[in-house]
Amino acid sequence: MKKSLPISVCILISLALVVFGLCFGTVRGYNADREQVTALLGGDNGLMDVLSFRGADGHNLCVVARRHLTASPEVDELSRIATILTDDTQPLSEKKLENDCLDAAVLAVKAELGGSESYLQSQRDQKYVAMLEGDLKNLSAADKGSLYNQAAQQFNEKLNAPVSGWIAGLLGVKPCELYQ
C-alpha cells in the first residue's frame, strides 16, 4: 500500500514552489526589461556607438588640424575628449561630461584653423572639416541620451515597486545608470 505525505509537508512543498516561482519569474522579467534598456545603451546604433562615432570625428578633426597647426592646446584638448569618448572602459558619466564639451572644443579648433594660411589654401581640408561638423551635428547624442534616460528611469521606477521590485533587488537585479 502507498504511504501519503502528511498535509503539513504538502503545504510546505507547495509554498516553497510558489515562492520559488515568484522569485524566478520576477527576476527573469526584470532582467528581460533591463536587457531592453541596456540595448539602447550598448546595442547597435545605441548611445555608446553614437558617442564613439562623435569621438572618432573629433580624432579626424585633430588629424586635419595637426597638418596645419603646431603645438595647439585646443587640438590637444579635443584629442583628449575624443579619446575618452572612444574608450569603452570610461564610465557613462565621464562620457556625458566630455560629450558636452566636444562641440565647444570643435569650435575652438575650427577657429584656430581659420587663422592658418595653409588651411585656408586647402579646399580639401575645408570641405572635410565642414563634413565633420555636419556629421557631429547629425550624431548629436541628445536624442539617444534622452531616449535612454527615459527608458532607464522607467526601469528604475519599476524596480522600486513594493513587492516585485524588492524581490528583484534582493536577488541581484541592479538599477540602470542614467546618462547625466
Image (cartoon, helix red, strand yellow):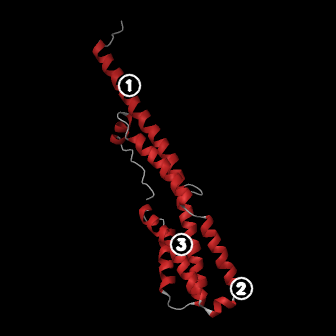
Element type where label 3 sits in the image: helix
Element type where label 1 sits in the image: helix
Whether pointer 2 and pointer 3 mark residues with C-beta atoms closer than 8 Å, the reply is no
For this orientation, the residue located farthest to the right is 123
The label shown at residue 65 is none
Q: Earlier in the sequence, mark 2 or mark 3?
A: 3
- Residue at 53% in and 80% down: 108
How far apart are the alpha carbons under marks 1 and 3?
55 Å
Relative height, residue 42 to residue 175 (above, below):
below
Front disc: 2 or 1: 2
Any part of residue 89 in sight: no
Q: Quadrant of the N terminus?
A: top left
Any part of residue 98 in sight: yes
Relative height, residue 21 to residue 11 (above, below):
below
Whether pointer 1 and pointer 3 mark residues with C-beta atoms closer than 8 Å, the reply is no
From the top left corner, tell me how far across and down residue 29 is, in percent. Answer: 46, 37
- Residue at 63% in and 74% down: 132
From the top left corner, tell me how far across and down residue 92 is, in percent. Answer: 44, 61
Relative height, residue 131 to residue 159 (above, below):
below
Relative height, residue 53 to residue 164 (above, below):
below
Q: Amino acid at mark 3?
A: Asp
Residue neighbourhood size for the residue with mark 3, other residues' Cα within 10 Å, grouped as few (<14), some (14–19), many (≥20): some
**Which residue bears the numbered disc 1?**
18
From the top left corner, tell me how far across and down residue 38 is, in percent. Answer: 50, 51
**Which residue bears the numbered disc 3?**
103
**Which residue bears the numbered disc 2?**
123
How far apart are the alpha carbons under marks 2 and 1?
72 Å
Q: Earlier in the sequence, mark 2 or mark 1?
A: 1
Q: Amino acid at mark 2?
A: Gln
- Residue at 44% in and 67% down: 97
